[in-house]
Amino acid sequence: MDNDVNIRMEQKRVNDVIQEINIKEKKLNSKAGGLKESIIGLRKNFWEDVTVNLEELDDVIETQASIKQQAELLSERERSHGEIDKQLKTLERLKDSPYFGRVDFKDETDEEFEQLYIGIASLMDQNEENFLIYDWRAPISSLYYDFSPGPAHFHTVQDTIHGEISLKRQYIIRQGKIKGMFDTGVTIGDALLQAALGHNASTSMKSIVATIQKEQNKIIRNERSNMLIVQGVAGSGKTSAVLQRIAYLLYRFRGNLTSDNLLLFSPNPLFSSYISNVLPELGETNIKQTTFIDFLREGIEKNISVESPFEQMEFTLTCKNPTVFETRKQNIRLKSSLYFKDLVDKYVSTLQTQGIQFRNITFRDAILISKEQISDYFYELEENVSLPNRMEIVSKWLLKELRLIQNREKDKDWVMEQVELLDKESYLQAYYENQRIDEDDFGLEEDILRNEVVKKQFANVRSQVRKFAFVNVLETYFKLFTDWNVSPLPENWDAIRTFTKENLLNRFLTWEDATAYRYFRGKLLGDQKSRSVRHLFIDEAQDYTAFQYAFIKEIFPYTRMTLLGDINQAIYTYGSSLNPLIPEFVGENHERIVLTKSYRSTKEIVNFTKRFAPGGELIEPFDRHGEPPEIITLEEESSLVDVLTETIHNLQDKKHETIAIICKTFHESNEIFKLLKSKVAVKQINEETYSFEKGILVLPVYLAKGIEFDAVIVPNASNNHYHQESDRTLFYTACTRAMHSLTIVTTHTPCKFLQEATS
Ligand SMILES: Nc1ncnc2c1ncn2[C@@H]1O[C@H](COP(=O)(O)OP(=O)(O)OP(=O)(O)O)[C@@H](O)[C@H]1O
């Protein structure tokens, strides 16, 4: 058929579907209007419609029941209204772009091919009989992602349906108009992908539903594995795939799984906001996201400061003292390892019989229960009761003791002084209470007031006891490095323990100690195992240590996990041995998927960066072309500012909107910022930056993780800057943030990675 006729017919169908959407929208709107009125009415007349009578106990109970009934009615209506609101928003999106794909499919029993249109949500005709659009997550829609014309099959919950595809078509529809239409063969939409990838970088990530690739679809629809591990090269769509996977799981297990059951660990706050649009764009609520440090901090005492991973990195990259550096490196290696976890476990087992440090329970500067008493009580308990259970028993005992002390304390003089300071309300309450019990006993009122005072004053002590504040966890951890005979001795143990002791005395945990300490705390006091998180997603998984993984497993023993990362971007090199992304790690019920195709950068940039990526021969560029990376050799170092300014102006002339100057360290980014701030409108990004706007940005590479820019400038790729083998992953990560343009500035002696790329 003539292409114009085809387009006309397809546009007619789009118009028909939009017509249906309009009708549905009208119906929903009138339903929503009715509901809204009823909600307003319910809210307005809430107190008129409930029977309020508080005279007799029976009346009070009836009143409570009546309020409850009214409140339930209101929240039911509000829920329905919310649901309609969500449907209306989806219809609004469908009206703009009802679908992006079509497959004509016939199963083995069918006579004729059926046309299946695929979009971001399902839509049925008015009689609710036929699908006008299939949700991209429906089982049948996987035909679109997994097959080209020819034999094809898809899995339903019970079955596998075999058949044949006769046509696969893609559309670009905007504001209800077909802007492009392609019939595709083997891979989906090179044309569409070209269009999607050729755009300028955005300050927030986009959904990729229309162009999900077969390999990515495997990640998205995986339901079997307890642990899904994705090793994917830079720009291969790991983050994109995981967000689509979340949307898929929410759809597939709707009714059983809500966004509260899913948790994502992201590498930095900037990244969290960068991806926060994708799920709402797909009509789903965002899931809980946190960085691993925030997650750890929740379980560490507030008066202990914790180093961030970025501070750790900055320290190792900028430390000038070789002895200090060496000790720190060894500390990181040790504390990141499972060997150290074993050591902590061994130490914890010795605490069964002795060694836990307790705190006195004090009140108004006096010791109420001494730490020795607590320790004696604790260690007299049965040895085979676990430490956390013993803590519970001690806490109960302490609360009982406190009640007795509280009673004794009541008659002291200071209580009367406090009674006099009580407000009018407390006096009134005491009066009524007195009346209720015995109106003739005047002494009772004072007793009630005294009770009120001690109860208030003891509330804090009691709450501290419930939180096990009577255990000095930090001091007990400290003893691991002082009183305990570690065996076998880790390498350079003396230097490591001196370093650790010094930090702990300052109530400071290095990043490598933070997990160990948090784990230790859990062993001592007990950890709440998370049952509500059913799926955990870890992006940039290469940057987690073996100890961190073991800890995560402890907290989430029943949770399915999806780990995504790239071993070539492992920037925390001293801690990242035994990473799950390496094939040897794969265990039972684990699945490993490898993505080798890089979509982000132009072919020229990928071919350049793959030359210094370990195992780079496996990286495959997507066929999108641009200018080759530019390498600028400085004649003199003082010319850097002019070179950078000129480069930025050139890039702006070429319509690049996000231009990132990616530095090795924050220290370097400070220097560059100072150089440039009077020349161009440059913005500096730091650990606290939660979102960014288009423009010229300067930032260290560890804050650029997971993000992409139109153009990247690496301002100093000299040998004296990227000089160690461990800098390779940093350099690689920096260069691979570029979508369209990469500029590298160096002195006459470029770093070896740059030499490898250009030799
Ligand atoms: N199937 C696809 N269709 C359209 N765009 C895609 C597809 N897959 C990836 N992309 C695009 O490629 C870019 C890189 O994707 P993404 O950030 O998800 O990769 P990544 O593997 O997480 O990268 P990195 O490890 O380097 O941070 C994004 O712009 C994304 O939109």
Image (cartoon, grey):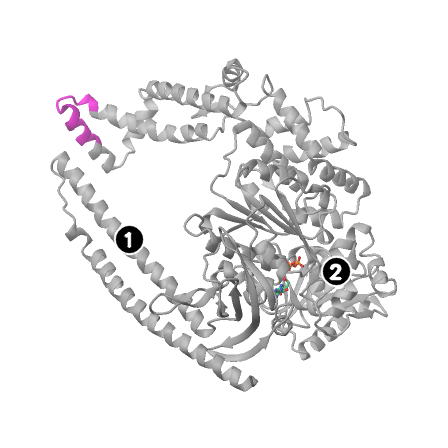
Q: In this rendered view, identify the residue nearer to me: 668 or 24.
A: 24
Is 84 situated left or right of 176 in this image? left
Closer mark to the observer between disc 2 and disc 1: 2
- For badge 1, the amino acid type reads Glu
- Ligand 1 has an atom within 8 Å of the beta carbon of the residue at disc 1: no
- For badge 2, the amino acid type reads Ile
Q: Identify the residue at horizontal 33%, vertical 20% (top origin).
A: 407
Residue 619 is labelled as: 2
Residue 112 percent across, percent down from the top left: 49, 70
Q: Identify the residue at horizontal 82%, vertical 51% (top origin).
A: 724
Is 750 situated left or right of 472 in this image? right
> Helix, strand, or loop for circle 2?
loop
Is residue 546 visible in the rendered structure shown here? yes
Magenta span: 430-444
| 207 up-or-down from 355: above or below | below
Q: Is residue 433 magenta?
A: yes
Residue 281 percent across, percent down from the top left: 49, 64
Dot 1: within a 10 Å radius of its alpha carbon, few (fewer than 14), some, or many (20 or more) residues?
few
Q: In this rendered view, identify the residue nearer to me: 38 or 359.
A: 38
Residue 411 percent across, percent down from the top left: 31, 19
Residue 76 is labelled as: 1
Residue 671 percent across, percent down from the top left: 72, 61
The CA span between labels 2 and 1 is 53 Å
Q: Is residue 649 magenta?
A: no
State the image quarter where residue 87 is shown: bottom left
| 452 up-or-down from 373: above or below | below
| Quadrant in the picture for the N terminus | bottom right
**In what quadrant does ligand 1 lie?**
bottom right
- Ligand 1 has an atom within 8 Å of the beta carbon of the residue at disc 2: no
Magenta span: helix, strand or loop, mainly? Answer: helix
| 216 up-or-down from 336: above or below | below
> Helix, strand, or loop for circle 1?
helix
